[in-house]
Amino acid sequence: MKRVGGTFGIPIVLAVATIIALISGLLGDGAVDAIAWLGLAAPLAAIIWVLRAQRLVRR
Amino acid sequence: MRTATVRTWCWVHKWTSLVCALFLLMLCLTGLPLIFHEEIDSALDDRPPLAALPKNAPTQSLDALVRTATAMYPGERPLFMSFDVDRPVTNVTTGKVAQPGRGDLHITAIDRRTAKPVGALDEDAGIMAVILRLHVDMFAGLPGKLFLGFMGLLFCASIVSGIVVYAPFMRKLAFGEIRTNRSRRVRWLDLHNLLGIATAMWVGVVGLTGVVNTLSETLTAVWRADQLAALTRPYQGQPPLPVAAWGSVDSAVRTARAAAPGTDPQFVAFPGTRFSSKHHYAVWLKGATPATRQLLTPALIDARSGELTAMRSMPWYMLALRLSQPLHFGDYGAMPMKMLWALLDVVAIIVLGSGVYLWLSRRKVSA
């Protein structure tokens, strides 16, 4: 497996996605909530994606 | 990083985690149903529905609602008035004295359109109340709350040290790499690292805001002593205003809203109560977005003359406290956010559990 962006490359992207999600949700209701959902889903999606890539979880 | 430094951080991560692990596990488990408390509460709600009236039915004056409540409990005076957001209901709290004990007050839920009492939700009864108390203070009051706050602080230290030791552990590994050809313990270590680092920001924010929330009583007391006292200084030394001399609460709320356009009252504190002065209606106004809904602006209305005495935004520590609430509860982005909050909570439980497992299954020689 390749080490994309070094040890902290992907973790930083996930952390930034999370913090954008948490703040954008505070700024309004409705459309900005969708940004919050996407950002909060990012860490979960990354976990599932990386485990599936190693065939550790199936669909 | 030098080996000695890594060992120190590992030591910090191990002990901060182990000390708070049991409490954090309890907080994560009780927090899970609390994410959905609105849905669960309304499912368990057995109050009769409100009278069906046209959508644009006129509402009664707030003074009429106060009269309804005081008529039900003769000899009591109004203390607080709060406004339900999901139904046209106003709750009026009454008591014999201005600052009664917990059991010595009555909350009457009143239909705003008819000024008739309706069924109130008993928030101190039922399974959700037990779960909430466990989560907030373990039934131990303020000391329990502050203790959990300290556990949360240890948890934050454990997250930071966890991020630091992630680097040396992952030096030769790709993100999320699970070494399946090694022992069970190594597989769990790799999974612990993946789940921990992927959710570190969420867990850190929920942990830190949880710690801030445990300071709510303390910060509110500081604020009342400091700012509220400053606002009402001109009235110091005057005798408390008798109930008979109070003017209309309805016009007090209208005066407050006119002074801060775009806001709605969240609650009104009557003269003499904890959230007002002895001479004022304190109308606590909130904004319209999830963030500004949390930022309350108290408008102090002279209860005798009905004029605005002062209005001041919250100080920074109260803003931090109020914003910590939605960031901890995850209740500001509709159902999808609650679902994600729950899933992230489950991941946190796995990280906690696997961390304890890694400690229990450590090689005895390397202690």
Image (cartoon, coloured by chain):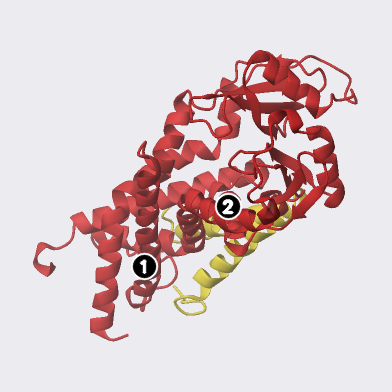
Chain colours: A yellow, B red
Seen from the viewer's position, the closer of residues B196 and B110 is B110
Residue identified by numbered label 1: B162
Residue B182 visible in image: yes
- Relative image position of residue B202 (x, y in whole percent): 51, 58
Q: Secondary structure at mark 2?
A: helix
Residue identified by numbered label 2: B224
Question: Relative to B334, does residue B83 appear above or below in the rendering?
Answer: above
Question: Relative to B153, does residue B98 appear above or below in the rendering?
Answer: above
Seen from the viewer's position, the closer of residues B96 and A58 is B96
Q: Which chain is disc 2 placed on?
A: B
Seen from the viewer's position, the closer of residues B344 and B144 is B144
Residue at 24%, 83% in the rendered image: B3
Q: Amino acid at mark 1?
A: Gly
Give me the disc on residue B328.
Answer: none
Residue at 26%, 57% in the rendered image: B18
Q: Which chain is disc 1 placed on?
A: B
Q: Residue furthest left?
A: B365
- Relative image position of residue B234 (x, y in whole percent): 70, 55
- Relative image position of residue B1 (x, y in whole percent): 32, 85
